[in-house]
Image: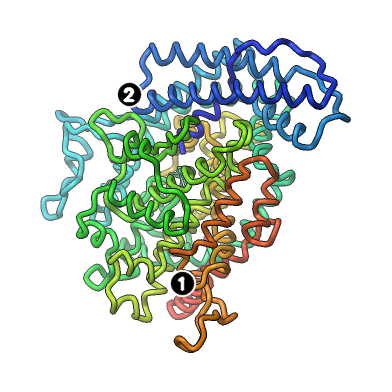
Amino acid sequence: MGFMCVVLVLVFLDFTCGNPALNIIRYREDVDEWLNKVDNDLLEFNQICTKLTWDMMVYGADENAKTKTKAIAQARLAWKNKICDVHFNSELLTDEQKRKLYLLCRGPKFTEASAKVEMEVLSLMHMAYDLQVCFNSSAPTPLEKLRNPEQDNFGYPQPGECLMAEPDLEYLIKRQDFNPDQLAFLWYTFYDNIASSMREIFPRVVKSQNIVASANGYEDMGALWRDELEMPDIELQVEEFYREIRPLYEIFHSVIRHKLLIKYGREQIDPTGLIPIHLTGNMWGQNWGALIGLFFSSNKSLDLDKRLKEKNWSVSEMAEEAEDFYTSLGLPAMTDKFWKYSIFEERENSTMCHGTAANMFNDDDYRILLCAKVNMEDFYVIHHEMGHIEYNMAYAHQPAVYREGTNSAFHESIGDVIMHGVMVPQHLHRLNLLTDEELLSPDIDMFLLLHQALSKIPEIPFGLLVDEYRWNIFNGKIAEENYNKVYWKMNEELRGIKAPEVRSEEFFDAGAKFHVPDNTPYIRYFLSSILQMQIFKGLCDLSLFGKFQNDAGASMKAEEIKMPLHRCDIYGCKKCGKLLEQAMSLGVSVHWTQVLKMLTGQDYISTKPLLDYYLPVYEWLKKYVEVNDIPIGW
Ligand code: X8Z
Ligand code: ZN
């Protein structure tokens, strides 16, 4: 969600627009009037900033755009400093007024000088990531040596060819027909290029970030990021959540390692050790969906990517299908401007390719930017981004200060909730991605659950890793000279993953993940992985098809026996859409516990729905481990 992220940075930078300096406001009514004015300014800033950010993402950041951004940022920081300097007689403030003031004034505090440094270092990070790699055309390259005439090298980069790191190399590393050396070469090409430039920049980022965080009373930038989530003991809570999920991850890890051992042999895989990241089918080892073939031999398997392609859908037709799911719930369709301005595919001159949803804060102007292809992973990304847009639309009537998710983890979870509704046999059958026979086959549940598990379970420890790591850099627990060593040590401890070979301090490998150069907090995805299952369960309980029906036709009253969560078909459930809409429409006007209570009946985060959802996979993996005598853990 690069866009929201960049904008957030700018939102915190803020505009001028002369509000008369009211340094002490004594009356409630005056506070309301003042807040209304401030809100109008905020809306205007958001409109200007989002337009600038969108244009920079789409057309690149030329000098003109940079100058404009700088000017707006300066104006905005002056504005924010001014409004946050106003004093109130707090006994007179209503709870609503207090919440607005908290929301307006949280985040970093800039001076002209610190804003300048911050913008410089953030822009350097972006340049390090938005990278095109050109493969050497003269000297014999590792690429040449790796080219195997016996093998289908189709798609392997040719000497002289230039590719974007994300998404082109990211896409290639999924290929299961490349050999381990070829996969390692792709991985090194991505990481060596990005992580070496990031090594020099990141310490400057840390310094700059901590200055602007402590200027507003936070201990460091990690504390500032955590504040947005409004979970006071979040560091302990996320540890506890992962402790609950870890047995599922470990058994899953062990079975995948065993399958990789069969495929690649002991030369590549240590049967009791760590999984090499470049063999996970993903540049960051966060999504193992490309490994589904390890479980189902290709001729027998149900290749959903292939089926999607056979439908001859374009990417925008995939987006229409996603929209259809949302409208089936009674949620609004995408707007005309969405279809007019959104970018779905990689362009010749694309600079930014990470999936992004943009709220332009302007009537019905919402957009997404993707470099998608026709495959299931990008079908997911489309649903994910549309979830952001539905959230944006639901709170559009709120004052500008409330037009955010109740916290960022909720914003990340909506589209994923919907995607869980897509990945049930009934809906895939509705999309003609499953035949009648497959719908009724007893194996279909396990296939889809494994598909979901491969795509989503590795994201959980990765979500924790990216931010625990950065929190510990911001608070000084990780010293600069150990940045990379600690990163790989945490990879080992938290998720049993290693680099192809030991990495030196010449690199800052965490910087090869988009959200690090984009300066976007990442724990939201960890929390979303858990929350989305809770919310999906909340919706499932409301839907008719969340329950087994009584004797065919005898009564339309649903039995109280619940449908297993992984089979819950929420498509068309108007009650579900209504509840989602009500919850999302509150924006950040209320604390997230209230929103979660509406959606699930509980006001706390629980891993139970996630563990229940995967229970059949867990049982299946346990048996598999016993039968094959597979060691667990690393
Ligand atoms: O960044 C994203 C979205 C945009 S908010 C495409 N995601 C995370 C990632 O790619 O690392 C979605 C899942 C995790
Ligand atoms: Zn997102």
Closer to the camera, 358 or 173? 358
SS at mark 2 in the image: helix
Residue in the picture at 43% in, 36% down: 366
Residue in the picture at 38% in, 24% down: 55
Closer to the camera, 192 or 432? 432
The reply, left or right, for residue 498 in relation to residue 223 is left
Query: CB under 8 Å between callouts 1 and 2?
Result: no
- Return the disc, 1 or 2, that comes first in the chain's sequence: 2
Residue in the picture at 73% in, 46% down: 233
Q: Label 2: how many residues lie within 10 Å, few (<14), some (14-19) or many (20+)?
A: some
The reply, left or right, for residue 470 in relation to residue 318 is right
Residue 208 location (% of width, % of height): 59, 21
Tell me the residue that label 2 is attached to.
59
Give above or below for 232 relative to 349: below
| Quadrant where ligand 1 appears | top left
Closer to the camera, 87 or 146? 87
Give above or below for 175 relative to 294: above
Q: How many marks?
A: 2
Q: Amino acid at mark 2?
A: Tyr
Q: Amino acid at mark 1?
A: Arg
The reply, left or right, for residue 162 in relation to residue 277 is left
- Mark 1 and mark 2: Cα distance apart in space: 43 Å
Residue in the picture at 50% in, 42% down: 393
Tell me the residue that label 1 is attached to.
567
Query: In the figure, residue 91 lies in which quadrant?
Result: top right
